[in-house]
Image (spheres, rainbow, N blue to C red):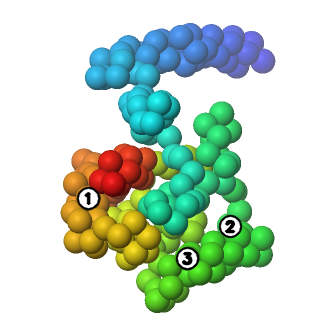
Amino acid sequence: MKTHFFPAIKLTLVLLIVLSGIYPLFIWGVAKLTPQKGKGELIEANGKKYYSNIGQAFTQDQYFYSRPSAVNYNAAGSAGSNKGPSNPDYLATVQTRIDSFLVHNPGIDKKDIPVDLVTASGSGLDPHISVAAAEIQVKRISAIRNIPEANLYELVRTYTSQPPLGPKTVNVLQLNIALDQLN
């Protein structure tokens, strides 16, 4: 027993020091080297401050819709729904989102709706949507705001970013702030 007990205690203490002290300090130090000093990117619009890296709820027809959130955009409770694709409750939620999207965007086929407009991300706080998700909403926004569709497509292109790894995305908050500035 002694041959296993003392090495286990030593390993526990080493991992406690490394994982509870050294690693968090290293990550904190790396964050302090970023342009925002580890505090996230703040955007100020209409007298309010927003974090551009946290999803915001946009559900009004004159705005680009954001990705649905499983946690109602509560950053303190970041989580997914933990329901699988065969769960009846999950399927009902997704179908409700599809039906709602089709009501607000007439003339669009169900098969053309990008998946990120009807499913929540793993964290429930994703601030981005795909380019396709932004572009499919252009017709609705153009009609409501009387802005030519070409101008809205250009706005989407302006706020499209390409991360080093992954597909092109659009930050919905930045896009909607720019949309308000067009008027």
Q: Which mark is residue 99?
A: none
Q: Which mark is residue 104?
A: 3
Q: Is residue 69 above or below residue 19?
A: below
For label 2, count other residues whose C-alpha is less than 10 Å away and answer few (under 14), some (14-19) or many (20+): few
Quarter of the N terminus within the rendering: top right
The earlier-in-sequence mark between 3 and 1 is 3
Spatial distance from mark 3 to mark 2, Cα to Cα? 27 Å
Image side of residue 157 versus residue 18, left or right: left
- Residue sitting at 44 percent across and 70 percent down? 144
Spatial distance from mark 3 to mark 1, Cα to Cα? 21 Å
Q: Is residue 171 above or below residue 118?
A: above
Image side of residue 115 versus residue 78, left or right: left
Spatial distance from mark 1 to mark 2, Cα to Cα? 35 Å
Name the one closer to the observer, 179 or 14. Answer: 179
Q: Which residue is mark 2?
A: 84
Q: Position of residue 178 (x, y in %)?
A: 33, 49
Q: Which residue is mark 1?
A: 155
Question: Label 3 is placed on what type of residue?
Answer: His
Q: Position of residue 94 (x, y in %)?
A: 65, 72
Q: Is residue 122 visible?
A: no
Q: Position of residue 72 (x, y in %)?
A: 67, 49
Q: Are marks 3 and 2 in contact (CB under 8 Å)?
A: no
- Residue sitting at 35 percent across and 70 percent down? 146
